[in-house]
Amino acid sequence: MKKVTNQTKGRIVSAAWKLFYQYGYSNTTIDDIVELSGTSKGSFYHYFGSKDDLLGSLSYLFDEKYEELMETMDPKLSPIEKLIKMNQELFLMIENTVSVSMLSQLFGSQLTTKGEKHLLDPDRTYYKLLRQIAVEGQQQKLFRDDLSVNDITKAYALFERAMMYDWCISSGNYSLCQYSEKMLPLFLDGLTA
């Protein structure tokens, strides 16, 4: 039953973000989301109290991408190569499916919310994958031994959020993917042994 429930929520989130990207947040209605997702208003309100609640769900969409990556990523890649691949895939997805204004609204909602901060949820697939890669890197002695797995995970997540935040405050006037291709190796040099 849980898989079906997650699929329903996932369909709602995916439909909402497609519509937000295509028509803008303000021009998208709950009826539009329900129609595209093939669900019902009851299902929508079971998971979300309002359209605004969907702002925090972008992390759910990102995690769908990470789940796909976990299944398809070449296990022969080094931990460093895996982090680079994750970053490329995420930032490519953002550039192609998430508008700067929507990503900005997500950051804004996470800053002002009194409730759950989805981006920081340690149970997200994103953090599980990062921890797995950090453990692998520690075991292979690729990462500095004075940093814990949690230090590496937190630092990497902080780097990605900083890149996205800067892209937002710069109004997306440069390629997030291309800029990260330059900056990520410099960041990773600070983590390696």
Image (spheres, rainbow, N blue to C red):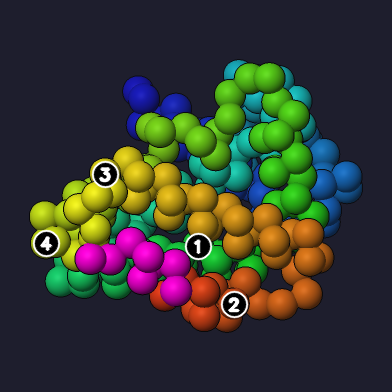
Task: Identify the element where label 3 is drawn.
Answer: loop
**Is disc 1 in contact with disc 2, using a CB cutoff of under 8 Å?**
no
Identify the image quadrant of the C terminus.
bottom left
Left or right? Give the position of 81 relative to 179.
left
Residue under numbered circle 4: 140
CA distance separating discs 1 and 3: 24 Å
**Mark number for residue 179?**
2
Tell us which disc is closer to us: 2 or 3: 3
**Is disc 2 in contact with disc 3, using a CB cutoff of under 8 Å?**
no
Residue 27 location in percent, x, y? 88, 47
CA distance separating discs 4 and 3: 14 Å
Left or right? Give the position of 178 relative to 81.
right
Tell us which disc is closer to us: 4 or 1: 4
The first of marks 4 and 3 along the sequence is: 4
Residue under numbered circle 1: 90
Q: Is residue 70 above or below residue 12?
A: below
Residue under numbered circle 3: 148
